[in-house]
Amino acid sequence: MTKPVKHLFVCTQNRPAGHPRGACAQKGSSELLQTFWQELQKRNAYDRIAITYSGCLGPCDQGANVLVYPEGILYGGVTKEDVVEIFDSHLINDIPVERLRVPATAW
Ligand code: FES
């Protein structure tokens, strides 16, 4: 396996119902992860892009959260409808999707 150019992490952390921090899994992150994997497969971009699930990334109230390296850019409130835009803009063309970035005050 070659070293990926971009590595995207989807938080799939879950917590008990009613937990004060909430959890990305309660905001559709498992389905979001599946959609990212489907898009990766469709584009056959395994040599450049890695997509991995993760535990809690920190600012749970902003979820569902997605973190992209090497830039270390955190996207919040991500839904499966945002997947193609994140691929086209950030993962392929290196242009972060500003409207989804978690504000610096939160992370
Ligand atoms: S549960 Fe996803 S960032 Fe904390």
Image: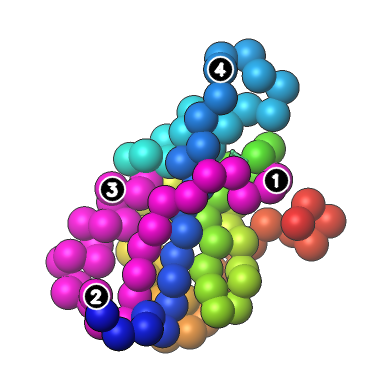
Give the mark, 1 or 2, whose residue is nearer the N terminus. Answer: 2
Q: Pick out the residue farthest to the front.
A: 1
Q: Is mark 1 within 8 Å of ligand 1?
A: yes
Q: Is mark 3 within 8 Å of ligand 1?
A: no
Q: Residue 80: in sight, yes or no?
A: no
Mark 4 sits on what residue? Answer: 16
Mark-to-mark CA distance, 3 and 2: 15 Å
The reply to whether discs 3 and 2 touch (Cβ–Cβ < 8 Å) is no
Residue ID for mark 1:
59
Image quadrant where residue 73 sits? bottom right
Q: Residue type at mark 4? A: Pro
Q: Marks 3/4: CA distance? A: 22 Å
Q: CA distance from mark 3 to mark 1?
A: 22 Å
Identify the image quadrant of residue 84: bottom left
Picture residue at 53% right of the left edge, 74% below the top: 69
> Could you classify mark 4 by the number of other residues whose Cα lies within 10 Å: few (under 14), some (14-19), or many (20 or more)?
few
27 is higher (above) or lower (below) than 20: below
Q: Closer to the N terminus: mark 3 or mark 4?
A: 4
Badge 1 marks a residue whose secondary structure is: loop
Q: Which mark is residue 46?
A: 2
Counting residues from the start of the chain, the first of labels 2 and 4 encountered is 4
Which of the two discs, 3 and 1, labels the residue nearer the N terminus? 3
**Dot 2: within a 10 Å radius of its alpha carbon, few (fewer than 14), some, or many (20 or more) residues?**
some
What number is the disc on residue 34? 3
Locate residue 60, reporting x and y percent.
65, 40
Mark 4 and mark 1: Cα distance apart in space: 17 Å
Q: Secondary structure at mark 3?
A: helix
Q: Residue at x 51, y 37 (%)?
A: 13
Quarter of image, ligand 1:
top right
Between label 3 and label 2, give the one nearer the viewer. 2
